[in-house]
Image (cartoon, coloured by chain):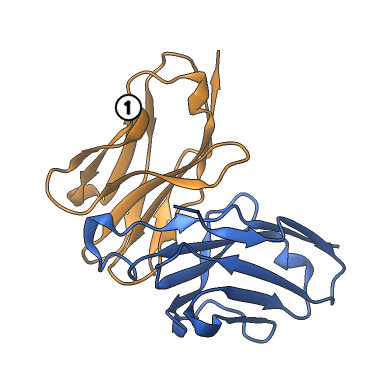
Chain colours: A blue, B orange
């Protein structure tokens, strides 16, 4: 099966500019996650969707970050305006079921990520 | 707060050496545990996982991990590493229907 697709792969912007990232999950996966991975750290959840509804956005800086998952398939993550500390890799992941409610076969699959540099 | 500690940030080994990477989690309830690997230039991939049952789990490429509940640990082991094991390794857990909580990662460099 095709993997999780993300675009763009790389983006360089100036601070205070806006940027958007796109994710297309694996077909049939109801749960979609956006993670932020800052250099030298592990990925940290920004937002979790179940179909087109938000399950957890407690770690999303809502004053500048927004995300949507229209029609429960593709998702877009936006930053407006960007700050220097937003420089990171933004990972999208998907799974058939949320967390491990689908049992041992419910694995999260990760996309290649978008590397954002804010100057 | 939920967290994962990976004590080794950078490990350098020679081929055929044995590997053990430490992982401790902080959470008071039942968890599911994972090791992910990221080879240079590639996606995060699942190496192995523990849900329940035998605390010694085997994954791909000869890796195994042991869950010790009393120590809140899930250490990764491999008896003999290869140059191709050079990668970054992440320990993670989840608590059911939520996303993963990751450690900060361990960069493994295997010298030929």
- Whether residue B108 is visible to the viewer of this picture, yes or no, is no
Q: Residues within 10 Å of mark 1 (few under 14, many from 20)?
A: few
Pointer 1 residue: B62
For this view, does B87 lie left or right of residue B63? Answer: right
The residue furthest left is B53
Q: Position of residue B23 (x, y in %)?
A: 37, 45
- The image quadrant that residue A60 belongs to is bottom right
Task: Name which residue lies at 51% across and 24% down.
Answer: B84
State the residue in front, A63 or A76: A76
**Point 56% across, 66% down: residue:** A24
Quick one: A10 or B86, which is closer to the camera?
A10
How many marks overall?
1
Q: Assign a secondary structure to mark 1.
A: helix
Q: Nearer the viewer, residue A40 or A116?
A: A116
* Side of A119 where A34 appears, left or right: left
Q: Is the C terminus of chain A in the top left, top right, bottom left or bottom right quadrant?
A: bottom right
The relative height of residue A81 versus residue B34 in the rendered view (above or below) is below
| Position in image of residue B99 (x %, y %) | 40, 67
Query: Is residue B86 visible in this depiction of the protein?
Result: yes
Q: Going 67% across and 87% down the picture, which residue do you hit?
A: A63
Tell me: A12 left or right of B32. Answer: right
| Spot occupied by residue B51 in the image (x, y as percentages of width and height) | 21, 54
Which chain contains the residue that carries disc 1?
B
Pinpoint residue A117: horizontal percent, then vertical percent: 78, 59
| Placement of B112 over or under B84, stated as above or below | above
């Amino acid at each position: 099966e095709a993997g999780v697709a993300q675009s763009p792969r790389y983006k360089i912007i100036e601070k205070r500019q806006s940027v958007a990232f796109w994710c297309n999950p694996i077909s049939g996966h109801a749960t979609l996650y956006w993670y932020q991975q800052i250099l030298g750290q592990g990925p940290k959840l920004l937002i979790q969707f179940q179909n087109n509804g938000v399950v957890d956005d407690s770690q999303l800086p809502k004053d500048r970050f927004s995300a949507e998952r229209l029609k429960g398939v593709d998702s877009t993550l936006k930053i407006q305006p960007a700050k220097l500390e937003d420089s990171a890799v933004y990972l999208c992941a998907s799974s058939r079921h949320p967390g491990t409610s689908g049992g041992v076969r419910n694995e999260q699959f990760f996309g290649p990520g978008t590397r954002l540099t804010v100057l | 707060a939920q967290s994962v500690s990976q004590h080794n940030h950078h490990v350098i080994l020679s081929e055929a050496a044995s590997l053990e990477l430490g992982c401790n989690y902080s959470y008071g309830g039942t968890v599911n545990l994972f090791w992910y690997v990221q080879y240079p230039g590639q996606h995060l991939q699942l190496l192995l996982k523990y849900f329940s049952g035998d605390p010694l789990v085997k994954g791909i490429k000869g890796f195994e991990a042991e869950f010790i509940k009393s120590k809140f640990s899930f250490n990764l082991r491999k008896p003999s590493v290869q140059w191709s094991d050079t990668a970054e390794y992440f320990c993670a857990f989840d608590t059911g229907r939520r996303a993963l909580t990751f450690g900060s990662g361990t960069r493994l460099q295997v010298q030929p």
